[in-house]
Image: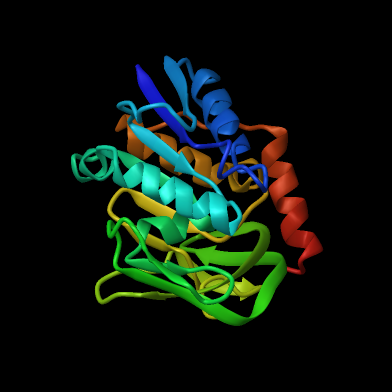
Amino acid sequence: MLRIGLLYPDLLGTYGDGGNARILAHRARARGIDLELVETRVGDSVGRADLYLLGGGEDGPQRLARDLLAQQYFASRVADGASVFAVCAGLQILGTSFAVEGNDTYPGLGIVEAVSVRGTKRSVGDMATRVGEHVLVGFENHGGETTLGEGVSPLGTVVRGRGNDGAVDGYRVGRIWATYAHGPALALNPWLADELLASATGQTLAPLVSVADELHRERLRSLGL
């Protein structure tokens, strides 16, 4: 039984990133994988999961989500091998520290060596990141700039938009994937959804052809990529 944990969609659901959970559930069940999707909302305890999802949110909800996760056993579950897919505010929460509007700085969970500060301007618009043989497409809307610590690899190289700093986007550390791309990202990038499922299940997944593949190709064409 694959367990997917959607963390605080009531706080980190501003940009529809909770849809990532629905995409993963659909693609898993289409392959006959037994799955349980568990939502953790404010007031709930974080349960055991094989794959956790963190989305984007505004400054206040981001701080609250960080505080709630710090009170749970979330970090130890990640250390024990759970996979994580984090977007935008979720990316910053997992890091060492992050700053909100006004440049007030708050501690992150310290799971990944990454520091996020306020940028000189807000990054808004289409983005695309080259990740190995693939291109991650999405939409960014954030005021942060993220610097990765020594030994922390970016998820990929930015070819459209800004991501962390105009050069790279997100990070990849062990079983943790993070990006600034909304969309929700997994609806726009079925290849990444399958990569997450393969990691969480330890299985080699059978191909799954769907309309999502053509939508991804069309998005690349529209971006001139």
**Quadrant position of residue 102:** bottom right
Q: Is residue 41 above or below residue 199?
A: above
Percent position of residue 45, x then y: 35, 28
Q: Residue sitting at 64 percent across and 41 percent down? A: 187
Percent position of residue 4, x then y: 42, 28
Percent position of residue 71, x then y: 29, 41
Q: Residue sitting at 41 percent across and 56 percent down? A: 93
Percent position of residue 39, x then y: 49, 26
Q: Nearer the viewer, residue 105 or 202?
A: 105
Q: How is the image coloured?
A: rainbow
The answer to whether residue 208 is seen in the rendering is: no
Q: Residue sitting at 81 percent across and 62 percent down? A: 222
Q: Residue sitting at 34 percent across and 39 percent down? A: 199
**Quadrant position of residue 76:** top left
> Residue 64 vs residue 201: left or right?
right
* Quadrant in which the C terminus is drawn: bottom right
> Residue 222 vs residue 128: left or right?
right
